[in-house]
Amino acid sequence: MWSLLYALGQTGLAVAADAGGMAMVLGRTLQRLGPPRGDSRELVRALKRYGEESLPIVALTAAFTGMIMVVQGATYVQQYGVYNLVGRYTGFTTFREVGPMLIGLMFSGRVGAHHTSELATMRMTEELDALRVLAIDVYETLILPRILAMVVGMAALVVFGDLIAIGAGAVCARLMLQVEYAQFFQALLEHLGPMDFLIGVQKGLAYGLVIGVVSTHYGLNAKGGSAGVGRAVNAQVVASAVALFWVDYLMTSVVR
């Protein structure tokens, strides 16, 4: 009994410590925004690494997302003959929920893990300490530009992924259900408005910030040598996934 309570207490303290650390990362990052004091060259480099180089994996993920949405409803479409609703339900689920979430998880696994491993390695090799000795602000030179790149890159990737998903869904509907492209896009445009699309983009912005803060926290607090880098990356992936679902729940509850 006591061992269980002790374990629960230790877990609670660890979660509270991580939450506090992430809050401090967020606060220090926001502090550098007024006025902005980030490294613009690092921002450009990060946008290329995080955004442009993520296009292939996001395109593949989004294409399968659109096709899966069509396949999931194919049985009911054929059973009830509601072929005119294929574009509607494909677009609704892709724009609002599935698209941003799957892209966010892929972004976390690729970009968040990369960011955490870089910071953790710099911490182990005392590069971060060397920057502080030289009176160079780590947040200005590394953290702020990269988090901004994650926020902008994630939102842009959601827009890109939505377009790929809808295109792939239309092709799948045509081949599998014989739904004409005109009928698919007519249902999409008639039943969905700009807000359905923008909700997904807003989630992309929030997901980018969450991934940036979580990955920074675990990277800056890694310890234990090379094995510690692996532990930090693993913790970041798990924590980011949990945080993304939590933020998604909150945003979905507020914006229906």
Image (cartoon, rainbow, N blue to C red):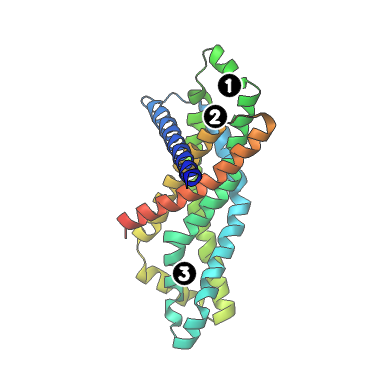
- Residue under numbered circle 1: 128
Q: Which three-letter amino acid code belongs to the residue tagged 2? A: Leu
Figure disc tally: 3
Split into 4 quadrants, where in the image is the C terminus?
bottom left
SS at mark 1? helix
The reply to whether residue 256 is in sight is yes
Q: Nearer the viewer, residue 213 or 154?
A: 213
Q: Nearer the viewer, residue 238 or 89?
A: 238
- Gap between marks 1 and 3, in whole Å? 47 Å
Q: Residue furthest right?
A: 226
Q: Give the label on residue 90, or none.
A: 3
Q: In the image, 208: left or right of 249?
A: right
**Could you say where residue 246 lies in the image, as x and y percent from the top left?**
42, 51
SS at mark 3? helix
Q: Quadrant of residue 95?
A: bottom left
Q: Residue at x 66, y 23 (%)?
A: 125
- Residue under numbered circle 2: 220
Q: Decide which of tag 1 and tag 3 comes sooner along the chain.
A: 3
Q: Residue at x 33, y 57 (%)?
A: 253
Q: Which three-letter amino acid code belongs to the residue tagged 3? A: Thr
Label 2 Cα crowd, 10 Å radius (few <14 / some 14-19 / many 20+): many
Q: Residue at x 59, y 37 (%)?
A: 232
**Could you say where residue 38 lies in the image, as x and y percent from the top left?**
47, 26
Q: Which three-letter amino acid code belongs to the residue tagged 1? A: Leu
**Could you say where residue 21 lies in the image, as x and y percent from the top left?**
45, 32
